[in-house]
Image: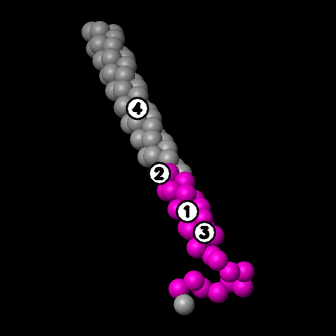
Amino acid sequence: MKKVVIVLALIGFTFSTISCRETTQDKVENSADAVGEDIENGLEEAGDAIENAAEETEDAIENAGQEIEEEIEGTDDYNGDDDNN
């Protein structure tokens, strides 16, 4: 009778260990998926920020070029005096 109780206890312990291991594996997989999604979202946001910064820089350079052209076209003397006098 003792052997039967011991065998049943070992079987129960084995099943509970396997069950805990599967639960732990599931938790690890879910955590890894969540971390992967967070990294992916962060990279997408960083890419968008870089793209926006590049567009803003391009616009600023274009505006600066236009302003320089306007200043050059508006200058009719060589001594640097302002034309608005």
Indicate whether residue 62 is drawn in magenta.
Answer: yes
Q: Residue furthest right?
A: 78
Q: Nearer the viewer, mark 4 or mark 3?
A: 3
In the rendered image of this protein, does residue 23 appear above or below residue 5?
below
Q: Please state the extent of the stretch shown in magenta in the rendering.
A: 55-84
Q: Is residue 34 left or right of residue 80?
A: left
Give SS at disc 1.
helix
Q: Residue 66 shows which numbered tag?
A: 1
Q: Residue 58 shows which numbered tag?
A: none
Q: Amino acid at mark 2?
A: Asn
The CA span between labels 3 and 2 is 31 Å
Proximity of marks 3 and 1: CB atoms separated by less than 8 Å: no
Estimate how packed mark 2 is, as few (under 14), some (14 to 19) or many (20 or more) residues with alpha carbons within 10 Å. few
Q: Where's the N terminus, which quadrant? A: top left
Q: Nearer the viewer, residue 21 or 52?
A: 52
Q: Is residue 85 left or right of residue 41?
A: right
* Residue behind mark 4: 33
Estimate how packed mark 3 is, as few (under 14), some (14 to 19) or many (20 or more) residues with alpha carbons within 10 Å. few
Q: Residue 73 shows which numbered tag?
A: 3
The CA span between labels 1 and 2 is 21 Å
The CA span between labels 3 and 1 is 10 Å
Estimate how packed mark 1 is, as few (under 14), some (14 to 19) or many (20 or more) residues with alpha carbons within 10 Å. few
Residue 68 in the image: state x and y as whole percent: 61, 67
**First-in-chain label (1 vs 2):** 2
Q: Amino acid at mark 4?
A: Asp
**First-in-chain label (4 vs 3):** 4
Residue at left offset 40%, top offset 32% = 33
Q: Nearer the viewer, mark 4 or mark 2?
A: 2
